[in-house]
Amino acid sequence: MTSFRFLHTSDLHLGKRFGQMPEETRQDLQQARQQILPRLIAVAREHGVGHVLIAGDMFDTETPSDRVWRQALAMMVAAEDLQWWIIPGNHDSAAAETLWAGLAKHASENIHLLMQPDPVLMAPGVHLLPAPCRHRFAGQDLTRWMDDHATPEGELRIGLAHGGVLNFGSEDGGGEVISPQRAASAHLDYLALGDWHGTFVLDPRSRYSGTPEADRFKHAGLGQCLLVELPGAGKMPEVRSVETGSYHWQEYLLELTPTADVLALLQALLPSQRSDWHRHLIRLRVEGWATAPQRLALQQAVADLSPEFCHFILEDSRLRSEHLQSDLETIAPSGALRVAAQDLMQAAEDASLAQEERDIASAALNRLFAYARHEDDAALPEAAT
Amino acid sequence: MKICAIRLENTRRFTDPVEITGIGPGLNVLSAANEQGKSTIFDALHAVFFKDAKSWDKEIRALAPRAGGEPRIEVEIDLEGQRYRLAKQFRKGSGKGEVRIWQGSQLFLQSDAAEAWLQELIKSPKDGGPAGLLWVRQGLTDFADAKETLAARQDLMSSVTGEVDAITGGQRMDAIRRDVRQSLDRLVTSRGAKKGGALEQAETAVAQLVAREEDFAIKVQQLRAQLDQRQELRAELASLQDPEVQQEQAARLRQAQQDLVAAERYQEKLLSAAQALRHAQLLLDSHDSKLAVFQSRQTDYREAAQACALAEERLRQVTAALEPVQAEVKTAQVAYASAQLQSKSDEAQLAALQQAERLAQQLQQRGALEAKLAQARQLQQQVVMLKSQAEQGPDQTSMDRLEACQAALVLAENAQHLAASTLVVSYDSGQDGGFLLNGVPLREGAKLSLPQGGKITVPGLGAIDLYPGQGLGADQLQRAEQELAAALATVSGLGGVTGSVDLDSARVLFRQRQEALQSLREAEIRLALLAPEGVVALMQQHAGLADADLEAAEAPDAAPTPQQLDQAEAALASSRAVLDQAATRRDAAKAQEAELRLGFEAANAHHQAALQRLQRAEVGLAGQEGDAKEALARLVQQRAQSAQDVASAQAQVETLQQAAPDLETARARALRAQSGLETSRMRLQELGRDLAVLDSRIATGAGEAIEEELAEVRGQLVSARQGLAAISFEVAMLRRLDLALEKARGAAQEAYVGPVLQELQPLLRLLWPEARLDVDAGQVLPKHLQRAGQEESFDSLSGGTQEQIALLVRLAFARLLARAGRAAPVILDDAIVYTDDARIEKLFDALTLQAGDMQILVFTCRQKSFRSLGGTQLSIRPTAPVA
């Protein structure tokens, strides 16, 4: 038999709203998500692939809006040259009868909704063994049945499942149930897995494709899908990633010391291609110790640069303040301002006080520093809240 | 810094150059009358130090002479042992003025550099320098909030601003505090989050999102519950529709129904056996009954035969006794009939006699009644006639009225007579009767009244006409006559009276009427006696007697005599006695006969009953065939057979009962199987309906994408909570910063006010021993003066006291500055206005005391009072124009 090629993808999470994001960002992300299927179609056609396997969580919820699932279905129906093999995941489990019944009602012949753990023939000599999630929390290894199901000797066996593995962990904590040895025990040529939003190689025959469009900071980089080629039964699959995402989700850690050059460190972290910043979502976690000038410089830099990004959030709750005598000199060499600054500094460093109280005093001192600098230099912007 | 000399030219009234020289380091006094230019010098000094030479503003223009000219001002100062001369030439129009500074004889600085040097030397009040110092203009010693005095206070504040700022943070502190407060004000008020502010918006957003999240969570929960329920229902539906389950149910029903049929058949068999047992039992009971009846009938027959023989004997005895009694009855009846005939004959005789007597009486009675009726009719006619008469003439009322009128007339006439002239005639002898009154001779001595007048005639002589006068009784008499005439007129109209009537005829008519009335009453009484119930009743009574029978009866020739009647009654009594005896005999015989007949009837009835009982006993025995013994034996044998049949049937029933299936159980099973099937069918229908409803609800909920909404809201909520936390932290941080600034500022103010008070205290005691002044640290204002154990508000103090305190406070500040090495002159322009002479001496002491190490310039118009102040006396003198 000749080799068999297909696209392996999962976790499209169509309909995801990104409620925690600001309105503008949300719109960008939602639009990008709507473009997943066209990009997958384009990738498939570009590589001459006739089959697309979606290993669960095609939709973000069990009750997506009619608009979401109807539009998705319409795109797949229109791509007549592609065969879509879809199983429910934990987010859109088979318990969502209304959703799946609606899909089935409007689906065309090239769309295969695999609602039962029964083998299907994808092509002559190619058997697909699906493990659809019947419920949000499966509670058992839905791939177990694959071990006991035999197919004709010399024909391809492809598993399609959604969920975490025993030593791996589910993305949503939805049950660590799939055996990591399933590909071997079930004699699968390839086990297409979903649930993990980043690409992950469990073993040469078992892979998580990751989401085609990233949706969280946990997995850095663009979303992608896997282009899989099975040379023949028992032979090692040939797999390569194809980028499909529009937005980079990046989380950076910036560790500061009172002597660090904040701006230089920040510049070094940020993506080098500045013209591409609008496609980046950045979460900058700043930790360590910073002086008031450093903090002010950081805040000003972030305020200055963040509008160029699709989204930029500064997470500095773990950044502690190092208050220096020189900072107090900047505020006032003597007099009441100096007294106030010293009072705040003392409170910030008073170990007998509650941490929250200390944090407030520290922040107040930083703000006093910013005000003093503002008075000294009217050009300085007011510190960001 | 100390001022050594001042020169002015073209400055207000000083168009020509003047100068004040010899200004010493301590106390200097320029004492001059008003309008001598003291204030001009004060303003000129102020312009030198505080106005740019290039300015030509209102203040500088006010310094120019009225006649025109450009002010030029020079001041010599001593600064740390160096003598400097400052010269400012103001020019009309901005930017043209000049400033130069000489150190000794060398030009030291000029233009902008000179201004900068001056600025540094003595900062303007705006820059917080001490130069504003203690320059006190006329009447500006008050600390009240008037506009001008506020400016003075600002001067005072600014005079120490540099020092104060060093301690309190100055304007920088103010700016920062203002920023903090503004930031806080944008977020919160004293009562919480500011309406429309970021904090309130964040709180509102969180609250709204929480509400939305709860709402969506509930909807999602409901949707999930509906999905779960639908799954359960579908599972149940599948289970119910499972062919195996349905077949099992049907098989269970069939088996139950078969078991029920078998049980029912067995039950019928058992019932049949029981029926046979009951039949055998009944047969046995019947045989028992028959045997008992047969034996009973035998006994009855024997007893009936014996009773019948006894009854026959008794009947025979009664019949024998009855016959002679019946013969006696017949004889007595014959005798009674004979006596009865005789008695009836006698009764008829007596009745005929009595009838003749009654007829005679009735005829007599009718005759009397007819006579009475005729009399009554006559009386009746009389009554009618008398009634008519009794209505003729005047009645009692009319008559009473006539009589009353007559009496009134008599009284009137009498009255007239009494009032009329009286005539008494006396004749001469032989002439009696010679006078005629109305033709009638008058008697001698007669007294005649002449109420109507009259005519006295003396024959042969003539006549005398007498006319009555119009006395008082004339009208009365006339009225009486009219009333009488009217009364009579009414009488003439009464029934039966025709024509006019006078009183007398009226009286006759009245009497006739009364008599007729009396006769009527008598006639009515008589009629009532004859016919008490009326003539009609009398006529009816008469008619009653004249009935046909009486009319038809033949009147007896004569009425029977009493003897005849007595004889007839005696004969009747005799015959009735005979009849009674005959009746007694007959009744006695009949009674005896009846008694015997009753005995006969009883004996006969007893006999008949015995015969019937015997017949019944015979009939009862006649049903048995053959001999009675045989019949009895046959009956006994039949009963034994029946008892055997019963035992057999009983055994059969018991056998069947032991093996009988439970019919009720079989029936319940069949019913349950049927019910289960029916329940399943109904449940299928219910499930169909419920699933349709659930499908509809789920489709609606799913179409609304509520899970996506919930996820979105939760994301927004996380973000909103983070935002709220950040703003809350910002508020806490700003409050903390504000608190720190407030606290530091307060402490600093206390820190600088303390030294001021320390300087002030000795000065105060010069005026008021043991006095103490409280100063508002923030506003640098005196608040209270405590003296003689009492606290007095500064505002309540007199103008003089306020003035003194104001001056002392300034001196204290000046002392503070001097100690800080930044001594500046104190310049007072008529600053002591209200202070009395006694107190002013003490103020002078204070001034002298302070002037020990600092310069004080006093401008005053109170030349006499200030003479005792001492110090360097200054004067304004003309001088040569400045080169």
Image: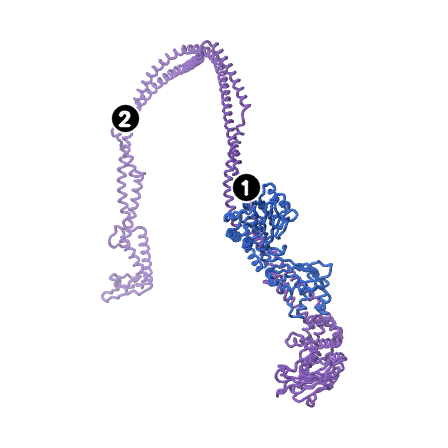
The chain painted purple is B
Question: In the current view of this chain or complex, which residue is farthest to the bottom?
Answer: B880
Callout 2 and callout 1 share a chain: yes
| Residue A321 % position (x, y) | 70, 62
Name the one closer to the observer, A135 or B695.
Answer: A135
Measure the alpha-carbon separation of dots 2 and 1: 138 Å
Q: Secondary structure at mark 1?
A: helix
Chain that bears disc 2: B
Q: Nearer the viewer, residue B237 or B219?
A: B237
Q: Mark 2 — residue? A: B559
Q: Nearer the viewer, residue A79 or B361?
A: A79
Q: Quadrant of residue B816?
A: bottom right
- Amino acid type, residue under disc 2 in the picture: Ala
* Colour pattern: by chain
B444 above or below B292? below
Q: Residue B341 at what x, y percent from top left?
A: 31, 18
In percent of width and height, residue B233 lies at 54, 42
Figure quadrant of residue B339: top left
Residue B379's place in the image compared with B287, above or below, is below
Could you tell me which quadrant the C terminus of chain A lies in?
A: bottom right
* Proximity of marks 2 and 1: CB atoms separated by less than 8 Å: no
Up the image or down, B458 lies above or below B288; here it is: below
Sequence-wise, the earlier of marks 2 and 1 is 1
Task: Label the blue chain with its letter.
Answer: A
The amino acid type, in three-letter code, at marker 1 is: Ala
Residue at the extreme front: A1
Image location of residue B697, percent across then percent down: 52, 48
Identify the subunit bearing mark 1: B
Q: Taking the image as drawn, is residue A358 in sight?
A: no
Tell me the residue that label 1 is attached to: B235
Disc 1 crowd rating (10 Å Cα; few below 14, some 14-19, many 20+) is few
